[in-house]
Amino acid sequence: MDQEKVLKNIESNPLSIKMIPNPTEEMKKVAVQKNGLTLEYIKNPTKEIETLAVAQNPRAIKFVQEPTEEMMLQAIENSWSDLQYIKQPTQKVITRAVEKSAWAIQYVAHPDEALQLLAVKKDYTALKYIKMPSEMIKEEAIKINYDALKYISEPSLEMELLAIGQNERAMTYIRELTQEKMRAFLKANLLTIKYMMDKIERAILVETLKEILSSETVEEHYVREFIRCQSITREHLSMDKVTFVYEYGSKKAKMITVDEKLKML
């Protein structure tokens, strides 16, 4: 076998290494330096060959049985998704992968709570890749974005309220509605009413509104939203909304109502 000719052939076509029965060390070096992924076809490579392969193409890490931490980090810096190819990654490598992309957590078998928290704080959608997240992790994800509720199979009422408090559109992720839950949602965010007007009992709607508007600690935005809300009509309350506030509202609610009506003129 003309070694010089073979080396030139490998240099022009690195994949030809797999057709050579017993390649020399030099042949192996030429192959991996041209295409790191040819490491797949090299039996019992030395650490030097593996290092050269990963340097040329970090994804070659998938063919390294016992990569060094330096090799692992090199692969991760190239692409966080290369974590899936790394056998027994160190905690430093795992953390770096999640720092680059929260979605890297899908390649971690048993992430601890600290790593889960790092992931959801970076990107709340990472929640969908975490098996059995703790209640704290779920709540943290929802605090970042109410949309995280859709990745939780059995959310608690507290989680639902946390999401709804941010945005009434979280109602689209609520799977089961009871009259008691609708009452709680209405208290948390009046605008949820448009998602449950055809489901909530009129008596519960009226009594809940009386309770909220009669309080001196009622939120200003709640009163203004009540006055502006087109989903709640005279028919639901048996009177117009201004009259309703003057009949059942607190002094604070009445003052806000007057101001809101003046703004609407």
Image (cartoon, rainbow, N blue to C red):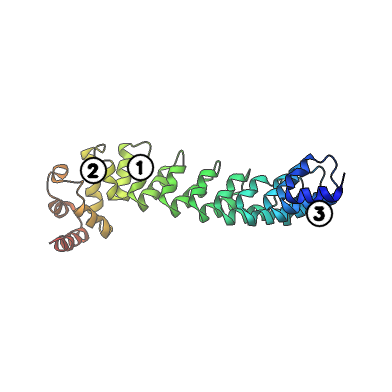
Position in image of residue 214 (x %, y %): 22, 53
Residue 212 disc label: none
- Badge 3 vs badge 2, beta-carbon distance below 8 Å: no
**In the image, which is nearer the foreground, mark 1 or mark 3?**
3
Position in image of residue 253 (x %, y %): 21, 58
Q: Is residue 218 visible?
A: no
- Badge 2 vs badge 1, beta-carbon distance below 8 Å: no
- Upstream in the sequence, badge 3 or badge 2? 3
68 or 119, which is in the foreground?
68
CA distance for labels 1 and 3? 56 Å
- Upstream in the sequence, badge 1 or badge 3? 3
CA distance for labels 3 and 2? 74 Å
Give the amino acid at mark 1.
Thr
Number of other residues with Cα within 10 Å of mark 2, as a class: few under 14, some 14 to 19, many 20 or more:
some
Residue 48 disc label: 3
Give the amino acid at mark 2.
Leu
**In the image, which is nearer the foreground, mark 3 or mark 2?**
3
Give the amino acid at mark 3.
Glu
Give the residue number, with chain letter if any, for mark 1.
172
Residue at 73% across, 53% down: 34
Left or right, 243 with respect to 40, comes to left
Q: Is residue 221 above or below residue 105?
A: below
Give the residue number, with chain letter if any, for mark 2.
205
Left or right, 83 with respect to 15, comes to left
**Quadrant of the rendering where the N terminus is positioned:** top right
Number of other residues with Cα within 10 Å of mark 3, as a class: few under 14, some 14 to 19, many 20 or more:
few
Position in image of residue 77 (x %, y %): 64, 57
**In the image, which is nearer the foreground, mark 2 or mark 1?**
1
Residue at 64% across, 48% down: 83
